[in-house]
Amino acid sequence: MVAIGPEKYNELYGKFRNLNRMLAWGHARAIENLLEQVAVDIVIADQFGDESLIERALFEKGRQVRLVQMPRGEADIAVAAASVLARAEFLRRLQALGREYGVTLPKGAGAPVDVAAAQIAKSHGLEVLARLVKTHFKNFYKIPRG
């Protein structure tokens, strides 16, 4: 697994400037990490963009396996299991960040997120939000400044 929290996400997005290339990088790192532990002939991944994105991001070990990418990859039980594990880790980390700042961090991009972000900016400062939110999302620019 390659866990990317909001702070690292913002750093990586600043480098990649493209979400699909960043996702491909994360998928490739996860594949390479697994190949360090387990020998396999085939790797299945959810297809989220052009198939060449993950293929180009793979290191040497990843280029030695057959990579199958398919839309709605969760139809495969291994991809579904990975998705469940990733979601559980996301929720665990979201809750931990909320505890660290004494707030409940809502998921998504709706009004509850806007309210929580404004409250955090008011009590902890706008600069703290770079540790908690994706700063290139529209919600970030709606937060009252000053």
Image (cartoon, grey):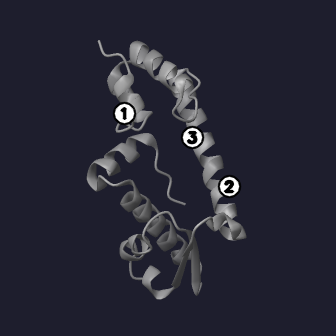
Residue 13 left/right relative to 102: left
Residue receiving disc 3:
93
Q: Which picture quadrant has residue 118?
A: top left
Q: Residue at x 52, y 67 (%)?
A: 47
Q: Secondary structure at mark 2?
A: helix
* Label 1 – label 2 distance at C-alpha: 26 Å
Residue 39 visible here? no
Residue 81: image location, x then y, percent: 69, 62
Residues at circles 1 and 2 in contact by the CB criterion of under 8 Å: no
Question: Taking 119 as reference, is 107 above or below it?
Answer: below
Q: Amino acid at mark 2?
A: Val
* Label 1 – label 3 distance at C-alpha: 15 Å
Q: Residue at x 66, y 64 (%)?
A: 74
Residue receiving disc 1:
130
Q: Amino acid at mark 3?
A: Arg
Question: Taking 113 as reference, is 83 above or below it?
Answer: below
Q: Amino acid at mark 1?
A: Ala
Question: First in sequence: mark 2 or mark 3?
Answer: 2
> Which of 141 and 105 lies nearest the eye of the viewer?
141
Q: Which picture quadrant has residue 24?
A: bottom left
Residue receiving disc 2:
84
Taking the view exactly as shown, the residue that stands out farthest to the right is: 77
Quarter of the figure with the N terminus: bottom right
Q: Residue at x 50, y 66 (%)?
A: 30
Residues at circles 1 and 3 in contact by the CB criterion of under 8 Å: no
Q: Secondary structure at mark 1?
A: helix
Question: Taking 62 as reference, is 77 above or below it?
Answer: above
Q: Residues within 10 Å of mark 2 (few under 14, many from 20)?
A: few
